[in-house]
Amino acid sequence: MVVEWWNTNRQMDLLEYQAKELFRETGIPVLPSQKIRCPQDLKGLKIPYPIVLKSQVRAGGRGKAGGIRFATNTIDAIAAAQAIFNLPIQGELPDVLLAEAKYNASQEFYLAILLDRTARRPVLLGSPYGGVEVTFTQDKMQRVVVDEEFSPFYARRLALKMGLTGEAIEAVSTVIKRMYRLFVQQDLDLVEINPLGIRDNGEVMALDGKVTVNNEALNRHHHLTGLLQEGNLEEAVYSGIFPAHDFVELDGKLGILCNGAGLTMATFDLVCEAKGKPANFLNLGSEQTWYGSDDDPLERLRLGLKAVTDSSKVSVVLVNLIAGVTLCQDIATTLVEFSEQIDRPCKWIVRLVGGDVAAAEKTLEQANLTSVKSLDEAVSLAVKAV
């Protein structure tokens, strides 16, 4: 992205694919896309060629650094992906790439909404010159300060100041209004689209996006916390959410998720004794740890599931949890929701212990997640599934 002079905390930036998830939910047009966690994922690509592959890093200048490449077939795409995965941009290597349909725009614009901390007001920014090669100057950037309650007038005013005419005024104004709604509803510091592509027929498309989260507002938007941790799992481990000794990565295909150090190590030992090869193991911590802090135990569980399944080599997940204050039914519902959202097939073996376990087992079975009562049986099934 180009306008970064105000942003000194890149850790609070979402990755492009995460920003576009928010765009899609808000009604801002985005292209069909797919996350790529390793080059071989491209063999199962669900979007048609030609495509563009983009390095998912927070650093700017991806295009000039070689982190954005086009491909017209699977062989070229795999070669491009291998190069991008091994390309550091300002010292940052991507954990994931974004594969996206290629879009031929007639013109490209720049749009942004940011918080002017001096004026304490939102500011709309726009330029009829957008794209990765553009260097903005004061005369090219139009600015509208939202000094009263927002109305469509502000969006239209920016579009007119950008020199837009005809159908482009309404199309771009609609995007600006939706950007502003996202900015306010999520308490963000920045929503940026560069470029916003437009075709002769008036169709617009957010071809790249950036969202910066307000750290002070995260307690009101737990899903944004999840996105930040998903985009930087290594930082999550060392920031105290999952201490390094509680999340260990290995070289197998079986992910292990437990709560409590003793339960985690017992499960890990049993898997190894059964000749299983763990890909990782994670101790979520006991419920005493959860309720002794401000953590939401179910949100912690979601973050743990993301950590365990982040690697594409994980094909089986063994979940072994003892519930106390947290209901087994709530844990089961969280597991089902997460399993339905993950973007690749994964076998789930779940053992829950707690007062309402019968209802939880029924929920898991209805979602085709294997539920067992015995730890030995859970370990045996997990190792065989791998």
Image (cartoon, grey):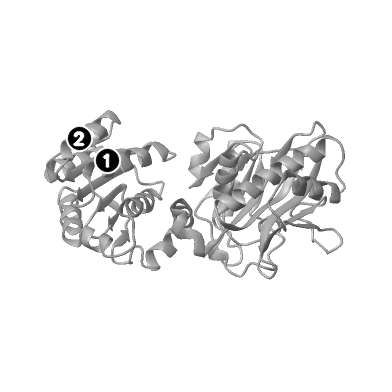
Q: Furthest residue to the top?
A: 366
Mark 1 neighbour density, 10 Å: few (under 14) some (14–19) many (20 or more):
many
Residue in the picture at 38% in, 64% down: 237
Please provide percent x and percent y for residue 186.
55, 52
Q: Give, as a three-letter code, the residue at label 2.
A: Ala
Closer to the camera in the image, 96 or 7:
7
For marks 2 and 1, the one nearer the N-term is 1
Q: Quadrant of the N terminus?
A: bottom right
Say whether residue 241 is visible.
yes
Tell me how far mark 2 sits from mark 1, CA to CA: 9 Å
The residue at which mark 1 appears reads as 332
Answer with left or right where residue 95 lies relative to residue 266: right
Is 227 above or below relative to 101? Answer: below
The residue at which mark 2 appears reads as 359
Closer to the camera in the image, 379 or 85:
379
Answer with left or right where residue 326 lies relative to residue 178: left
Say whether residue 386 is visible.
no
Residue in the picture at 75% in, 47% down: 155
Please provide percent x and percent y for residue 356.
17, 40
Please provide percent x and percent y for residue 65.
67, 59
Closer to the camera in the image, 230 or 312:
230
Closer to the camera in the image, 233 or 240:
240
